[in-house]
Image (cartoon, helix red, strand yellow):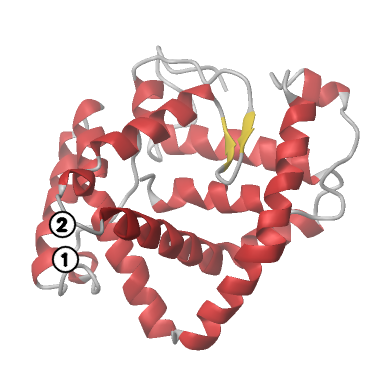
Amino acid sequence: MRGLRALVLVVCGLAAGACAYGPPTRESLAARDPYEQMNRDTLKFNAKIDKYFVIPTVGLYFVLVPEPGRKGVHNFLGNLSLPIIFVNDMLQGEVTRGAQSVGRFVINSSLGLGGFLDPATKMGIPGHGEDMGQTFAVWGAKEGPYLVLPFFGPSNPRDAAGLALDWTIDPTNFIHMKQHVWWAAGRGYFTLLDLRSQTWETVQGIQRNSVDYYASLRRFYRQYRAEQIRNGRSAQAPAGLPDF
């Protein structure tokens, strides 16, 4: 699965505002968005999922699960994503970050009671996110046109392919269990709840401050992904990275 910060954008894609569906603009046509009308229709569909499923279940999640419990769920899901993060660290040649991922997984899986606690951070081993979409970008793959995926929200062909490959290499998919489908569904469900509970204020801020929510979301996604690909380094992308 994607790292938490990247998946925040998935949740943003499920949110909808009254101003989300303004008419296409010249700016949008110049922003490599040839599928804008289809994207806007998909965003409307995602808005219905948000209204009738996501918001009610997140509200119930807040009522039934106290903050320490929600923090534990967040830590556990983050720990499950560390093997995928490690693979992408190494594919990008980020040996130091890869070592951090291994250290966090070992410490949090043991001292952290299976990942529900996060002693690694207190020990000076910070967390980070990586996914195959970022790896493709480091390898020089262009992002392609902007896409809004059903359920998953903002993306592009490169990141969509990366999302599928991350799922394929997820080691939990190779664990033989009788109820694997229910495990995968439960993990996805709680990932959604975790993300939505942590990004509610961010999503509301984008909606309130946007004349055209769709265009704002598209711009936010591209800028945020560019920042993730740089891993916090200088805004000047090295040779071979896509031009955002």
Q: Quadrant of residue 50?
A: bottom right
In the picture shown, does residue 171 fall above or below 89? below
Name the residue carrying label 2. 105
Side (left or right) of 189 relative to 108: right
Name the kind of residue labelled 1 in the image: Asn
In the picture shown, does residue 61 fall above or below 187? below
In the picture shown, does residue 210 fall above or below 168? below
**Image x and y of residue 231, in percent:** 37, 38
Which residue is drawn at the image coordinates 73% and 18% (left, top)?
34
In the picture shown, does residue 97 fall above or below 55? above
Side (left or right) of 238 relative to 81: right
Name the kind of residue labelled 2 in the image: Phe
Distance between mark 2 and mark 1 Cα atoms = 5 Å
Q: Residues within 10 Å of mark 2 (few under 14, many from 20)?
A: many
Residue 85 is at least partly visible in this image: yes
For the C terminus, which image quadrant? top right
Q: Residues within 10 Å of mark 1 (few under 14, many from 20)?
A: many
- SS at mark 2 in the image: helix
Instruction: Give whichever of 27, 8 is nearer the camera.
Output: 8
**Image x and y of residue 77, in percent:** 32, 61
Contact (Cβ within 8 Å) of mark 2 with mark 1: yes
**Image x and y of residue 89, in percent:** 23, 35
Which residue is drawn at the image coordinates 36% and 60% (left, top)?
187
Name the residue carrying label 1. 108
Number of numbered labels in the structure image: 2
Residue 180 badge: none
